[in-house]
Amino acid sequence: MSQPSFTARKTANVAQITTSCLVVPIFKGLKLKGDIAKLDTQMSGAITRAIELGDFTAEVGSSASLLGNDRVQRILLLGCGTAKEFDLSSSKKLAQAAGKSLAATKAREAHLALESLPLTPEDTSHLLETLATEVLWACYVYTETLSKPKNLPNLAKVSVAAIPELTLGKVRKALNAGVAIGEGVNFTRQLGNLPANICTPTYLSKQARALGRKHAKLSVSILDEKKMRELGMGSLLSVGHGSDEPSQLIVMEYKGGKAKDAPYALVGKGITFDTGGISLKPGGKMDEMKFDMGGASSVFGTVQAVVNLDLPINVVGIVAAAENMPSGRATKPGDVVTSMSGQTIEILNTDAEGRLVLCDALTYVGRYKPKEVVDIATLTGAIIVSLGHEASGIFANDDDLANALLAAGQRSHDRGWRMPIWQEYQKQLDSRFADMQNIGAGTAGSVTAACFLARFTEKYKWAHLDVAGTSFLSSPKGATGRPVPMLVEYLRGRAGQ
């Protein structure tokens, strides 16, 4: 993946700068000032005329392109809306418009002229982060299995100048943070978009090892099926029984804090393809089940971002990877398996397999005595009925953890919504033949799935993110990279940043 680099300049007089594309954010109703006003004069009032003629409204997220001169070949105007209404949502829309426009341009490099924005240093820093993330997101193009990729972006470099309210060091810090998140998002998208004949559990293991080789603070270990059998992971192993692809438990340990500090844990569902097993899914859109490892891919992207941000905390990322296929060896409805916790599970539907791999991974992560655990999974279609594609479902046994994730989602504009896991729902999981069954009675499907996981997480603070509606989209088809921004923001908060 070719992605643009970001640099911070000590100073930049916009009226004298030379660039392929000058990006100028403009607030609605405010007169042009300073260097932007000088540039407008040099351009014979082109910016002012675009506004007066209505070609550019300055509504938040709007954009307009103007031809420049010998020094500034193009001018990209971005609408910020009104100054008093500019908030995190506006910042996101502005950054998305910048990313989309820059990815579509033929310019090789661009300069962001933020010097005249009437924003606080904190808001400017947040905008810089968001701009870097969104530009990288917009410049991502899947090419892995295309013989002749099309619409590849030309953008190779983006620069920003220090402003009076924000030092050069703080500009660089904001850009670096945005780049780390953007690269983590794109890594997650790339893994999700790969076809299932490439992205297998073994492939994910290789990706983890490659990540570990790049970073001294990251160690990686892989538990194969033999080791998982020795540990009693009968639930996880039951999912891959019907596949020729061996299941894997991938463990990535980042040691950025003190040796004695308890880690924050991320656990991802990594079903690299989900046919439903014997409870076979309908054929329509089954190809989208390559995205059923969206939880796992978000763990990879978040761990990469945490490493690149060099956060002063310890993090363990665990991926339960398997392929769910029908065959003569496959688990059958009615089978009973024993989980690593010793609890038995009656499998009434083999298409409710995500919770079966997660429950053993959630038991295993208890060995690390984690400070908090967040699992991420494309667990239920029911969460899409509840929340659509706008918010991830958040379930938690701890209010502080739930609130931290909700706040992180608001700050990163990668939002979630808290759902209940009340005891009253647990009775739907009662089984005559085992300690529990793996599906509920037919109502509140996302809630009963979370209640199932809750039975394996009683010894620590835990939250479950159901990202079935947010980690990928059907139109345009592709992985989104969510909830990496939320997870990174949550961990930055826990790290005091």
Image (tube, rainbow, N blue to C red):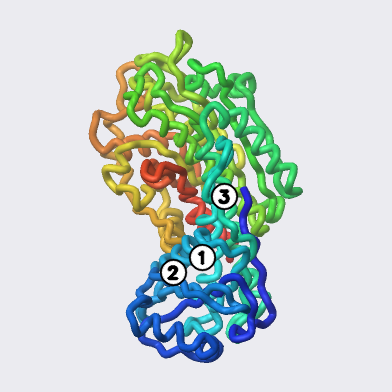
Q: Residues within 10 Å of mark 3 (few under 14, many from 20)?
A: many
The residue singled out by tag 3 in the image is 302
Q: Which residue is mark 2?
A: 94
Q: Residue type at mark 3? A: Thr
Q: How many marks?
A: 3
Frontmost residue, 33 versus 372: 33
- Report the amino acid beneath label 1: Thr
Could you tell me how far apart the alpha carbons at marks 3 and 1 are, in whole angstroms? 16 Å
Give SS at disc 2.
Answer: helix
| Mark 2 or mark 1, whichever is nearer to me | 2
x, y (%) of residue 182?
A: 56, 56
Q: Residue at the location (36% across, 76% down)?
A: 55
Residue hosting label 1: 130
Spatial CA span between label 3 and label 2: 24 Å
Q: Secondary structure at mark 1?
A: helix
Residue 445 showing in the rendered view: yes
Label 2, label 1: how far apart the Cα atoms are: 9 Å
| Disc on the earlier residue, 3 or 2 | 2
Q: Earlier in the sequence, mark 3 or mark 1?
A: 1
Q: Position of residue 266 (x, y in %)?
A: 54, 44
